[in-house]
Amino acid sequence: MSEQCSLYIKVRISKENLDGFLKARPIASTLNSNWLDWWDSREMYSKTELKNIPAYHVPSNGDILQDILEDNHIIAKQAYQDGHWYLLGLQFSENYSEILPMLSWIKDLAAHTDNNDTGEAFIFDYLWGDKTVMAYIQISDKQGRLTRFNRTTEIDSDTLAEANAMFENLSNNLQ
């Protein structure tokens, strides 16, 4: 992977739970079979063994969000609509090792949802059109579960259409 992939998060979460998540300290995920299965399914140059999952080293999850929103390279936007929180990062990352803290962050976000809340988060090639999915997390039952999705064709078509429309809107508003 040599092009920047985009980050898309959509999760049903109450404002109170989102606020609690943003005030909490980032925690590292525990390396388990879900992480290892996902890592083994990734195609990358010079793949190393996955030994641990790093966390962001900042005082709060809100600091991570603020850093993303203020990073002019990422070009990010968040929104809260109809009980869903969205986070978009147009140029998020091109490197699997770099995305590990974000994936851990998303899994922690899932733990702050209510039992019936659902969502998804994925890092994919929106800008360059090669249909690559670096990571896809399904959020349900207060858990974020990495899937083995490698191509955008594996993502629900309505979900992908919504993500693409939101990124198109973000891109158009840059001009």
Image (cartoon, helix red, strand yellow):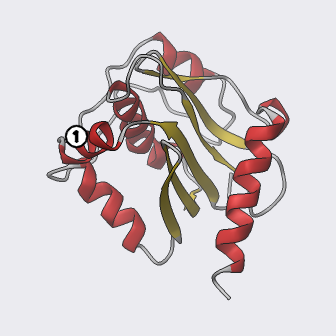
Q: Give the structural element (helix, strand or loop) at label 1.
A: helix
Residue located at (78% from left, 32% from top) = 156
Q: Residue furthest bottom?
A: 175
x and y, in percent, of residue 114 in the image: 38, 23
Tell me if 100 is positioned left or right of 155 in this view: left
User: Is residue 104 in view from this perspective?
Assistant: yes
Tell me if 125 is positioned left or right of 116 in this view: right
Q: Is residue 106 above or below residue 64?
A: above
Q: Quadrant of residue 68?
A: bottom left
Q: Which residue is mark 1?
A: 20
Tell me if 69 is positioned left or right of 134 in this view: left
Q: Residues within 10 Å of mark 1 (few under 14, many from 20)?
A: some
Q: Quadrant of residue 88?
A: bottom right
Residue located at (83% from left, 37% from top) = 157
Q: Residue furthest front?
A: 82
User: Is residue 125 in view from this perspective?
Assistant: no
Q: Residue furthest top?
A: 33
